[in-house]
Image: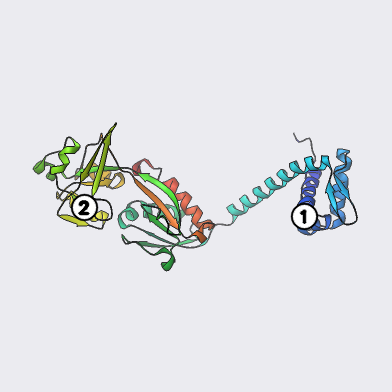
Amino acid sequence: MLDISFEQLKSMVVFAQVIEQGSLSGAAKHIGISRAVVSYHIKKLEEHLDIKLLNRSTRTISLTEAGSEYYQHCRIIAEQASAAYHQIENLKHKPVGLLKITCPVNVGLQTIVPALNEFRSKYPKIELDVMLTDEVVNIMKEGIDLAIRGAPLPNSGLQATKLSTLKTCLCGAPSYFKKYGIPKHPTDLDSHQWVLYKLTSSTLQLSKGSRSFSIEMKGTIKTNNAAARTAFVEGGHGLARIPIYDANPKIQNGTLLSVLDDYQMQDINLYGVFPPGNAESKKLRLLLDYLKSYFTKPSLL
């Protein structure tokens, strides 16, 4: 139960504003009440507390020692009231406007587009312009609000926030393993064919405990598209390191098999990259937070 009246709480907020604005007149103007009402609240506080809070002259005010201590509590109450108001206002006014997004084709179709489907249902007033491409788009030139990238693009002048760390696995088709055999150890990989994804390194790193292995991947098929890479692997043309979100459905369907699962491989760090001027955009912050939450789904990790 409150041991202070609502009128006293109001007076505490008025007192905090007097200190913030530097004068009774400034507080009156800021709050939207008369100077006389401000003076009344200060007088009632001092009478209730039975102590002087302000030293007043014709031109200036200053805090007494007691007033300085009391102001700190009043300031916190005022700030919390303001924060509560703004939080409710944010809930009342749904974000609106256009978000232009670009991301690689495969990760876009399999993770970003499903996430945007859910996001759009929650925030129907936000318009989406989604560009799926495996080419690196000039964000500033194209007016992109958010780009999904596998790296934060250092020294680009852009800002980045990490969305997720995606696991990968080493896969091949049953038809490929029937012809070339299943590798039992990383050193067996030297004799295997690979489907090469040109946007990543051609060196595969594997580790187990304190031991690590570096495999140079060589093959007669190269592509700059992740979906095409997976399709060529399914066709029996070689091995590839494939993200779990892409590989799992195909492993369950029997078109891919994963090997050397007891070895660790490089994860894929997924970033949201955006122009620094967009950092305070409410709709962009909502989307970034939503994507981070979406990528905690077990099927994507």
Q: Residue at x 50, y 54 (%)?
A: 285
Residue 154 image point, x, y percent: 41, 55
Residue 249's image quarter?
Answer: top left
The disc label shown at residue 21, or none: 1
Tell which residue pokes out farthest to the right in this image: 58
Q: Secondary structure at mark 1?
A: helix
Residue 232 image point, x, y percent: 18, 53
Q: Say left or right for 177 vs 170.
A: left
The reply to whether residue 60 is visible in this rendering is: yes
Check disc 2 and report the residue beneath it: 196
**Front-most of 254 and 301?**
301
Identity, as a three-letter code, of the amino acid under mark 2: Leu
Distance, label 2 to label 1, CA atoms, is 65 Å
Residue 244 image point, x, y percent: 30, 44
The disc label shown at residue 133, or none: none
In the rendered view, tell whether residue 180 sits above or below residue 262.
below
- Dot 2: few (<14), some (14–19), or many (≥20) neighbours within 10 Å? many
Identity, as a three-letter code, of the amino acid under mark 1: Gln
